[in-house]
Image: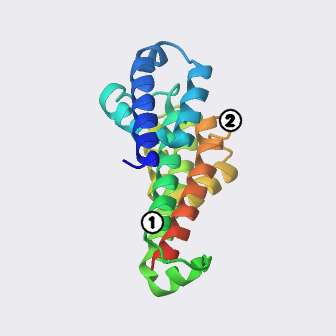
Amino acid sequence: MDKLIIYLICINILGAVLDGVTAAKRRRTSHKALSVLLGIIAIAGGAPGMIIAFALCDRTASKTNMMLRVFTVCVCVIELAVFMTWKLRPVGKWSFAFWDVFVEYRWTLWFVAAVSVVTFVMFGIDKYRAVKGGYRIPIAVLLGMAFAGGSIGALLGMVVFRHKIRKNYFSVGVPLILVMQVVLLMCVVNLL
């Protein structure tokens, strides 16, 4: 078996086990050292195993584990996109012509624009409800809209409405989601 495959299997098992074991502790308190260690494991290639552990052992999203979830999913998507592009792309220069995808497939531009506008409006509504004390839009919904293509709208909503800028899972997570989407777009451009 290839050494890379053995390494990836081991690091994913380590990530899954460590995240599964610490899930109960994270629910009760915030363990920054464990989160940093799990973040390093995610960067080292263990993100898919950690996502499996999230699904099996720690299904409840809370403020204490949200940043680790956002980080892990972004790292996993980036690693998988780069790996697939590296394996499937013919040898040659990398292209950075992002706009060509939007020109050739116009629906992608309209989709990103629509989701960004909806996300921006959702941030405004949530800020209004926060000030007035009404029902709030869940964190997972706001982050999910950013993941779905609305990261530009989320960033604009954070700045314009001065909303969620002190929460690390937004102030760090949304720019990370945008970076993930740019890397994913770059990989798509190089595979087409």
Instruction: Residue 166: give its label.
Output: 2
User: Pointer 1: residues within 10 angstroms few (<14), some, or many (20+)?
Assistant: few
> Considering depth in this image, is 67 or 4 the residue closer to the camera?
4
Give the vertical position of 160 relative to 72 (above or below): below
- The single residue placed furthest to the bottom in the displayed view is 104
Identify the residue at horizontal 51%, vertical 80% (top origin). 102
> Considering depth in this image, is 90 or 144 the residue closer to the camera?
90
Give the vertical position of 14 relative to 111 (above or below): above
Q: Is residue 61 visible?
A: no
Instruction: Residue 87: give its label.
Output: 1
- The single residue placed furthest to the front in the displayed view is 1
Q: Mark 1 falls on what kind of element? A: helix
* x and y, in percent, of residue 113 in the image: 51, 70
The disc labelled 2 sits on which kind of residue? Arg
Name the quarter where the C terminus is drawn: bottom left
The disc labelled 1 sits on which kind of residue? Lys
> In which image quadrant can residue 12 be found?
top left
Q: Mark 2 falls on what kind of element? A: loop
* x and y, in percent, of residue 182 in the image: 58, 64
Identify the residue at horizontal 42%, vertical 79% (top origin). 107
Mark in the foreground, 1 or 2: 1
